[in-house]
Image (cartoon, helix red, strand yellow):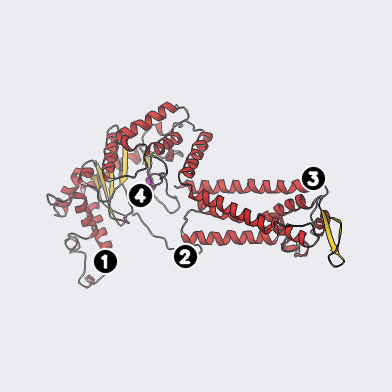
Amino acid sequence: MPFQNTKNKQILHDITGIFKSGMNAILGPSGCGKSSLLDVLAARKDPDGLSGTVLIDGQTRPNDYKYRVGYVVQDDILSGTLTVKENLAFSANIRLSKTVSKQQKADVVKRVIHQLALEKCADTRVGLDSSTAIKVMKLLHEISLNGCTIIFSIHQPRYMIYKLFDQILLLSLGLCIYHGPAPDILSYFSESLGFICEQYDNPCDFLLDIVQGDRHSSVILKNSVKEDDKEEDKKLTQNKLAETLNNRYLKSYLWASVQQETDNYFNHPSSDQILYEKLPKKCRFNELYYVSQRVLRNLGRSPTVIIIQIGVSIVFAILCGLVFLRIDHTLDQGVRQRAGALFLITTFQVFVNLISLELFLKEPTVDVFAVANVILGMIYLIMMIFSGFIVDLTSIVAALNWLQWFSIFRYALYGLNINEFTNLNLCATVANNTTSICSYRGEDTLIERHIDFESDWDLWKNFLALGIMTIIYLILTYIQLLRIKKYK
C-alpha cells in the first residue's frame, strides 16, 4: 500500500560465482532468491540497494547489455490470442535488426518451430506442456554446446532434464550452499556431509530435501543447536540450517577454486572489446507497426473489451440523445438543457479514460489500482470545479483562481459553448406562455458566463490549449513507460 512503512529485506547474501559456457542451473526452494539473482545478472533489478560487481568475460557490462542477452521472464507474457507461429514471428520482427529481410525472419521462425517439434500446433493457440519443456531444455543444451552461456532457475526438474546440467548453484535463503560442476554435487554431499542419494531418488528432490530441512536436518545441526533451542520455530531452524550449510561450503575446495578464479578475472580483465561493438539499429516505426498489428489481432480474436467499450458509448449516446431530444430555443429551459448536454458529454469523455490507468502502474494490484483511481478522480473533480460550469470563476479567490488554466473541462466546455451558442436565436415566452419574443442572441449567454467569442482565435485558443495539454500528457506517459521498462 502507498504511504505504508516498509522494511528492507535482504534476499541475497554475498553470492560469488562464475557461470561458464554451458547449462548453468540455479536450484533451491521457493523464496531462496533464484529469480532475484537472475534479475541481477540480467541487469533487470533496480541498482538501488544492490552491492557488488557483475563482469562479462572480465569486463563491466556495457550500457546496452540488456539488449545483448536473451531473458525469459518468470511470468507468461505471450499473447494467448496469437498462435505459436504468430508469437514467434512477432518476437523475430521486434528483436531482429532491420537489416534482416522478412524471408530471413520467416526462416528463423520455421527453424525454431522445427527444433521444438511444434509443426502440428504451429497455427494453434497452445501452452507449454512437460514434453515441450524437455524439448526446450534440450534445445538450450544444443545452443550451449556452441559456446553460449545458459543460466536458468528451475524447481524440481525431472531427472532427464537434470542430466543436461553442466554447473549448479544451490541456494537456500539467499545463501550459497553449492556452486560447482553438476556431476560432482552428489559426491560433495556424500563426502563432506555423509548424505548419500539413493539409487532411484531424483537428485534434485534429494538436494531440496536437504536445504529445506526435510532430510538429515538433525545431523547437520547437531553441533549448532543448543538444548534449549529444541522448541524454536521452524523459521529459525531453517535459518540455522542454511547458515550451517553455507559455512560448510565456504570451507570446501569448491569455494577456494571459485574465489581464486574470480580474483583472477578482477586482477586480469579481458581485453576483448566485442561487448562494446555497437548493435545494429532497429527501426522504431517497424516496432510500432508490429505492436499495433498484434493489438489489432488481439482485439479481433478477443473482442469482449472493445465490444463493451463501444457498447457503453452507443448506450450513452442513445440515452443522451433521448434525454435531450426535445431541446427547444427558449431562453430558460433551452439554455440549461444545452449547457447540461455539453457538460455531460465532456464529463463522460474524460472519465472513460480511467479504464487505461492500469497500463501505467508498476504494481497493478487491487489496492494500488484503487488508490490511483481515487487520486485521479480527485484531480478530475478539481478540474471540473474550475471548469466555469459549476462555479463562476470570477467568484473564486485569487489564490485558487489560477487552477482554471489547468482544467481540461474548462477548455473543452468553452469551445463547445462557443460553437453551440454563436449565431443562435433564443426566445422568451411571456403573457401566460402565449407570446414568444425571439430577439435574444446566444452570444448573450456567453457574455453572462464570461466566455470570449468575438474572434476566431477565441474559439481556437481552446483547441490549442487542449493540444498542448495532450502533448504534455503524452510526454509524461512516455517518461513513465521508460521508467516501467527500465528494470523489466
Residue 433 inside the magenta-drawn segment: no
Which residue is pictured at 39% across the width and 44% down the height? 42
- Per the image, label 2 sits on a secondary structure element best described as loop
What span is in magenta?
31-44
Residue indicated by mark 4: 37
- Ranked by sequence position, the earlier of labels 3 and 4 is 4
Mark in the foreground, 3 or 1: 3
- Per the image, label 4 sits on a secondary structure element best described as helix
- Label 1 environment density (alpha carbons within 10 Å; few <14, some 14–19, many ≥20): few
Residue indicated by mark 2: 5
- Per the image, label 1 sits on a secondary structure element best described as helix
Mark in the foreground, 3 or 2: 3
Position of residue 145 relative to residue 337, above or below, is above
Residue indicated by mark 3: 456
- Per the image, label 3 sits on a secondary structure element best described as helix
Q: Nearer the viewer, residue 238 or 306?
A: 306
Q: Amino acid at mark 3?
A: Asp
Mark 3 and mark 1 residues within 8 Å of each other at the beta carbon = no
- Ranked by sequence position, the earlier of labels 1 and 4 is 4
What is the x, y in percent for residue 439? 87, 56
Residue indicated by mark 1: 234
Position of residue 365 relative to residue 154, above or below, is below
